[in-house]
Amino acid sequence: MVKKSMHKEEFDREFLSLANFLPEKYFYHLSSFFEGYRRAVANFDQEIPTLLLFLQFVKKEIDSPSSFEPYHRKIRYPRDYYQFGLDFIRPLIDLNASHILGLDQLERIQKLLHKKENIILLANHQTESDPQAISILLEKTYPEIASSIIYVAGERVVTDPLAIPFSLGCDLLCIYSKRYIDHPPHQKADKQLHNKKTMQLMSRLLEEGGKIIYVAPSGGRDRRNTQGMIEVAPFDADSIEMFYLMAKKAKTPTHFIPFTLATYALLPPPETIQVELGEIRVAKRTPVHIAFGKPFDMDHFPGSQEPDKLTRRQMRAKAIWDIVNHTYQTISKNLPRYS
């Protein structure tokens, strides 16, 4: 009991000390997040060591921000950021009520990876903590897949000091999305050059083979519509085409798998898209669900006979989105409505 009390006092002291480092907006958002975390987890005192570690990481990012190469490999030594991310998010997930759909596909994916073939997961995206949620669901049955997924990541998760500690524990291909590449305008050329380097590295990874890459072709997270229902964001046809062309160029067999996530309630995104950093984060304890679909034939799909190539690309993107959306709608019928 004394140890827990000391942890609580240390946590409060460390947290209050952040007021001297963080801009007021960040400090307020972090206060709200910890209050939600405190209400959500079953035993807050038990999680205090992990939360203290998070505060130390945030301070470090304020003092000396981490920089990310176009291809970032997860850091596991001397600090194991991967394990930290899982330990931080795990108490928020109701594992007994969570599900993995498509276990037969997972077995097939593992065999393909062992044969040095590639997997590209074409997925929706709902929360900043999607990588951790995926790993937590897979860590007991398919730990090798859980720790080997490479995530195509946007600018925000590698520049926000509250998100960086979790990003450091992931394998990332860092890219600027269309949504933010023009902001600010004077950095557009540098961002385009960065993206080119990332694509070159991705080509090499695909040539090596045995890689599993997660990409959200929407370029952002799913959000609620005006009726309060969560909508799977549309998939960008050009993004999917780019990955398809890179896979063909690599000449290593690459399989495209529609992949569905239902993680929204874990850490919902803001109601509207924000250009500036520093969003409100509301943590809740919730079940999460993921579903692996059957391999998608990138050459034969509804609309593949269209003579216009741009129309074909759009039809392919819609066909993949239809699979992910249908799976999500099936899963969401059993989810409590988020409010």
Image (tube, helix red, strand yellow):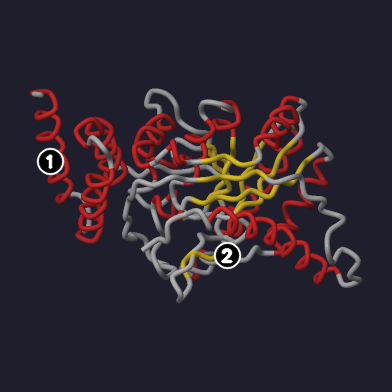
Q: Residue beneath label 2, please? A: 233
Side (left or right) of 59 relative to 242: left
Question: Relative to 129, does residue 303 appear above or below in the rendering?
Answer: below
What secondary structure is found at the residue carrying circle 1? helix
Which residue is pictured at 54% across the width and 30% down the height?
147
Q: Say the numbered circle drawn on residue 77.
A: none
Quarter holding residue 43: top left
Q: Nearer the viewer, residue 192 or 8?
A: 8
Q: Position of residue 303 (x, y in %)?
A: 84, 66
The CA span between labels 1 and 2 is 39 Å
Side (left or right) of 122 relative to 94: right
- Mark 1 vs mark 2: in front: 2
N-term-proximal mark, 1 vs 2: 1
Quarter holding residue 120: top right
Q: Position of residue 302 (x, y in %)?
A: 83, 63
Q: Residue beneath label 1, please? A: 12
Q: Position of residue 333 (x, y in %)?
A: 53, 58
